Amino acid sequence: MERRDKRIWLCLAHMSGNEMKYVKDAFDTNWVVPLGPNVNGFEEDLQRFVDSSDPNSSQPESPVHCPLSFDEEQGCPLTINGCPKRPHSVVALSSGTAAVHLALIACGVKAGDEVIVQSFTFCASSHPVTYLGATPIFVDSERDSWNMDPDILEEAIRDRISKTGHKPKAIIPVALYGMPYRIDKIMEIASRYNIPVIEDAAEGLGSRWNGRVLGTFGKYGVLSFNGNKMITTSGGGALICPDKAARDEIMWYATQARDAYPYYQHSAIGYNYRLSNICAGIGRGQMTVLNDHIAHHQKLAALYEQLFKDVHGIKFHKNPDERFDSNYWLNTITLDPSLKVKGEKYAYKKVVTSAIGGAGGVIHTVDNPTTDCQPNNNVEAMRMGLDAFNIEARPLWKPMHKQPIYSDSPAYVSGVAESLFKVGLCLPSGPYVSEDDVHYIVEAVKSLIITE
Ligand SMILES: Cc1ncc(COP(=O)(O)O)c(C=O)c1O
C-alpha cells in the first residue's frame, strides 16, 4: 500500500470563514478585552444550542428521565442537580479546565473534601479537584459506553460515607470521545444522595442522551473549545449553569470576585477565567458550522463502523443503544490482544522524543520507554505503522487511577478502563478528514495486520 504525502491528523480545527467578521468587529470597535459583544453573542448562541432539540430527529425530544427530581414535600423541582430547569445559562471561559475548576468551587468543594471523578479521562477532569486541596475519588467505567459505571459509583459513595463520615461533594462523569454516560442512572443515584453532578462534556459538545444535549442534566456542564474540539476558539471553554443566579456566581468567580465598591474589594478568592472577546469572535463564527461538524464526525463514524465490520480482531466503539447519540469527537477502535501487527518487536524499544498525543508545550524527557501500564505491543505497533503511513493515531486516555501523580487517591475499579486503555486507539476524525481518507486509514490498518 502506498504512503500518502499529506498527513492525516487526529483532529484539526476547521474554520467556517465567518470567524474573521466577528474578530474584525472586535478590533474595529476596540473590544479587545475579556468581555464584550462577541462574548455575549457567543454565550447566547451556546445557550440556544444546548437547549435545542435534535436537528436530525423528526421525533419530538423524548422526555428526560430524571427520577427524584421532584420534591414531593416541597412541591417543587429539586435544584441540587438543576435537571428539570430550562433555559440554561452559559458562561464563556478561558478553558474547559477553568470551567471544571469554577463548577467545583460553586459546589462548595474545599480543602479536605472528596470529589468522585470518572477515572477514564483526560487529566483536566480531575486536576482542578487537586487545585482546591480536595481529593479525587476515581470510579471505573462500564464496558458499553466506556464511561462512569453507575453501580461502582454507588458503591464508592457508600464506602466513602462509611470511611470518612462525609459524602463526596460532587460527581464528575465524562463523555469520553463524545460518548454519553448513563446519565439517567447517574442522576438517580446523585439525587438519592443529594450530591451535585458536574458533567464533563468537554469532548461531548452536541452529543445527546435521549435527544437532550449533554451538559444540561447535571447541576453544571463543562464544554471545551480547545484547538482539537468539535468547535474551537483557539483555546476556551464554557460552563452550562442551571439558572441566572448560578451563572452570576460563576461569572463573579471568573472575574476576580469583586464586591460592589468604587475600589477593588474582595471577600473571596477569584480567578481571571473569562473568555477574550477576540476568541469569542472565533466562537461565534464556529457556531455557524457546529451542526455541520457534528454531522461530519457522525458520518465518518458510520463509515468506519461499516469498513471495520468484517476486519477480524478490530472492534469499532459505537453507541451502545438508541438512547446514546455520540458526536464521535474521536473515532476509536480496540485491537484484540491476539491480533498480530507488523513491527511489534519495535514497540516501546525507543524513548519517545517528539510530542505524541497533542502535547503542545514542553514534555519531560524520560529514561525508560515503558511503564507498568501501557497499551499492548500490537496497539503501539499499529500506532507506529499508521504514523509511517502519515496517519496520526493516539492511544486512549490512560486512566487517572494508573497515573503516578494519583497513586494515593482512592479508586473503585473493576479493571474495565485499564483493559480498554491497553487495547484502544483513536483514529483521525473531524471536518478535515474526508471519506476517502477513512478508506485509506482502514486499508492502512488492514495492511498492518499479519494474517497467517
Ligand atoms: C474530558 C476533558 N475534560 C476537560 C478538558 C479541558 O478542556 P480545556 O483543554 O479547554 O482546558 C478536556 C480537553 O481538553 C477534556 O478532554
Image (spheres, rainbow, N blue to C red):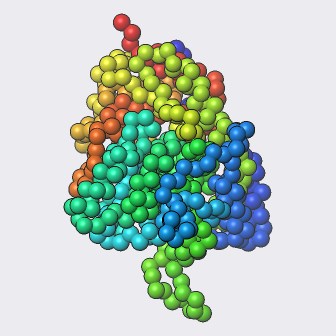
Relative height, residue 59 to residue 249 (above, below): above
Residue shown at the point (58%, 59%) measured from the top left: 84
Relative height, residue 210 to residue 97 (above, below): above
Q: Position of residue 205 (x, y in %)?
A: 58, 49
Q: Position of residue 439 (x, y in %)?
A: 58, 21
Q: Residue furthest bottom?
A: 262
Relative height, residue 388 to residue 116 (above, below): above
**Which quadrant of the view contains residue 299?**
top right
**Which quadrant of the view contains residue 36?**
bottom right
Viewed as shown, does residue 285 lie left or right of 134? Answer: right
Residue shown at the point (36%, 57%) measured from the top left: 116
Q: Position of residue 433 (x, y in %)?
A: 61, 32
**Which quadrant of the view contains residue 39?**
bottom right
Q: Can residue 230 be seen in this snapshot?
A: no
| Front residue of 89 and 377 | 89
Q: Can residue 49 be seen in this snapshot?
A: yes
Q: Position of residue 284 (x, y in %)?
A: 71, 56
| Front residue of 175 and 73 | 73
